[in-house]
Image: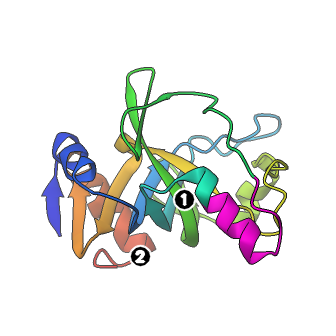
Amino acid sequence: MKVITQADLLTTLNAIRGATFATIISETDPKLKKTGNTLGPVRKVSRVNVCLGFQYENAVNRQRDREDLESDFEAKPRQWGVKISPMLVEHKGRIYLETKVEKSLDCHFIDAEGNKIPFEIVKPFLPTRSQNSRQATEKEVIVRDYALDSILTIAFKGEKYVLAQKVETVAVTIPRTVPVNN
């Protein structure tokens, strides 16, 4: 596993041509309901297989083809942020990696000390997810944007990277969740 800075990761990502698959481990602040919530600070750790550099409209139309539907989906412009490359978005001074979720491998919640919180305890405070009605597909094409500063590790094209500012976090978080070399 190579340690890489955000700047070097941006350079590496911008050198990718076409779509490529990756595995991301991220740590984010989940949006939890406040009413009755006594959990204190909670972090969400996710390990996800994604596609980078994809074209949303094409991905939805391919899914519509697989479901024997007419391939006439037209994407609307992004609701927030500005695309600065095929896979990067800038919004309010932060850079985000635009991904198409292929498979969620692991997701759990941790407290301020890094202890795992059972999902059943967090579940009542999670907001209900809305479905994308515009796609009109049985299997939704899920787009997720990850702030670069929320990515702990990323693996693609045979290389595994840990973000430099996240080295301590990875050492604390990853052993409790998944092996670092996965």
| Residue at left offset 76%, top offset 38% | 33
Which percent across, then down, holds residue 67? 80, 75
User: What's drawn in magenta, residue-wise?
Assistant: 59-72
For the C terminus, the image quarter is: bottom left
Visible in this render: residue 143? no
State the separation of the CA atoms marked 2 and 1. Answer: 22 Å
Tag of residue 100: 1
Q: Considering only vertical position in the picture, is 162 above or below 69?
A: above
- SS at mark 1 in the image: strand
Residue 137 located left or right of residue 61: right
Q: Quadrant of residue 71?
A: bottom right
- SS at mark 2 in the image: loop
**Front-lying residue, 2 or 108:** 2
Colour treatment of the image: rainbow
Q: Considering only vertical position in the picture, is 63 above or below 166?
A: below
| Residue at left offset 70%, top offset 42% | 32
- Residue type at mark 2 is Val
Label tally: 2
- Residue type at mark 1 is Lys
Circle nearer the N terminus (2, 1): 1
**Front-lying residue, 120 or 180:** 180
- Viewer-side label of 2, 1: 1
Visible in this render: residue 16? yes
Residue furthest out toward the top: 92
Residue located beneath label 2 in the image: 178
